[in-house]
Image (spheres, rainbow, N blue to C red):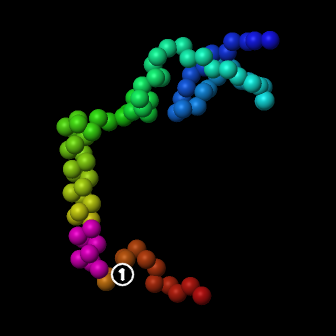
Amino acid sequence: MSTTITGIVTNGVVVPSSPLPEGTRVEIHLMSDEGSSANPLLHFPGHLDPNDPVEQEFVEELARRRREDLAKTLREGGQECSNSSSTRIT
């Protein structure tokens, strides 16, 4: 017996429109060519284009802040963390 149940792929997982009984065997037929791109993960909502000027600005700012943080950490070298407890635990 054959029953048609539609669904959608989310994060690479087929999500049926209605529950399937445990152990059900399935055969998947693709409805369109939408999923046939070289890397479908590049087309999810929120993916950023590395050539986008705003994305490039963000990456540059992130790199600058990382350099500043590293320089600060190296300057403070031997100082204890002010958030650490001085209580000895035995």
Q: Position of residue 27 (x, y in %)?
A: 67, 20
Q: Main secondary structure of the magenta part?
A: helix
Q: Position of residue 13 (x, y in %)?
A: 58, 31
Q: Nearer the viewer, residue 59 or 38?
A: 38
The residue that label 1 is drawn on is 80
Q: Is residue 44 visible?
A: no
Position in image of residue 20 (x %, y %): 73, 24
User: Callout 1, which amino acid?
Assistant: Glu
Q: Is residue 52 visible?
A: yes
- Specify start and end residues of the magenta stretch as a single range: 70-77
Counting other residues with Cα less than 10 Å from the Cα at mark 1, is it few (<14), some (14-19), or many (20 or more)?
few
**Residue at left 70%, top 22%?**
26
Vertical comparison of 1 with 54: above or below: above
Residue 43 figure quarter: top left
Which quadrant, please, contains the N terminus?
top right
Q: Give the x, y percent position of residue 25.
A: 75, 24
- State which quadrant residue 30 falls in: top right
Q: Residue at x 60, y 27 (%)?
A: 14
